[in-house]
Amino acid sequence: MILVTGAAGKTGRAVIQALIARDQKIRALVHRNEQVAALKQLGVQEVIVGELSFEKVISQAARGARAIYHIAPNIHPQ
């Protein structure tokens, strides 16, 4: 399982498509519930909705992942 953060953006979707083309299982971390269906349609096995700044969310998302492809937000107040 590979975790992709920022998965709903342009880069995230491109990364996901490339990984799925290589038969990789993907877990996506997104910020909003509205983004889940589109990622599932791409073939993502698991989608976690949450805020990157919360340790509990990151811990849950990373659990069992063999790799993390982190796409940082372009603009963030912190």
Image: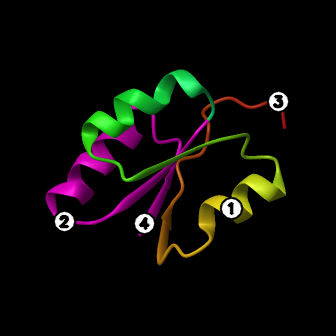
Q: What number is the disc on residue 2?
A: 4
Q: Is residue 56 left or right of residue 9?
A: right
Earlier residue among tags 2 and 4: 4
**Label 3 vs label 1: CA separation?**
23 Å
Earlier residue among tags 3 and 4: 4
Residue 55: x and y in percent read: 82, 58
Local crowd at mark 2 within 10 Å, few (<14), some, or many (≥20)? few
Residue 42: x and y in percent read: 26, 39
Q: Residue at x 31, y 49 (%)?
A: 16
- In this figure, which residue is indicated by the disc labeled 1? 60
Q: Is residue 62 left or right of residue 59?
A: left
SS label for mark 3? loop
- In this figure, which residue is indicated by the disc labeled 2? 23
Check the image and report above or below for 8 versus 61: above
Q: What number is the disc on residue 30?
A: none
In the rendered structure, does residue 29 fall within the stretch colored magenta?
Answer: yes
**Label 3 vs label 2: CA separation?**
36 Å
Q: Which residues are magenta?
A: 1-30
**Label 3 vs label 4: CA separation?**
27 Å
Label 3 vs label 1, nearer the camera: 1
Q: Is residue 47 left or right of residue 58?
A: left
Earlier residue among tags 3 and 2: 2
Of all residues shown, which one is farthest toward the top? Answer: 34
Check the image and report above or below for 34 versus 78: above
Question: Would you say the residues marked 1 and 2 are in contact, meaning their CB atoms lie under 8 Å apart?
Answer: no
The quadrant the C terminus occupies is: top right
Earlier residue among tags 1 and 4: 4
- In this figure, which residue is indicated by the disc labeled 3? 77
Local crowd at mark 1 within 10 Å, few (<14), some, or many (≥20)? few
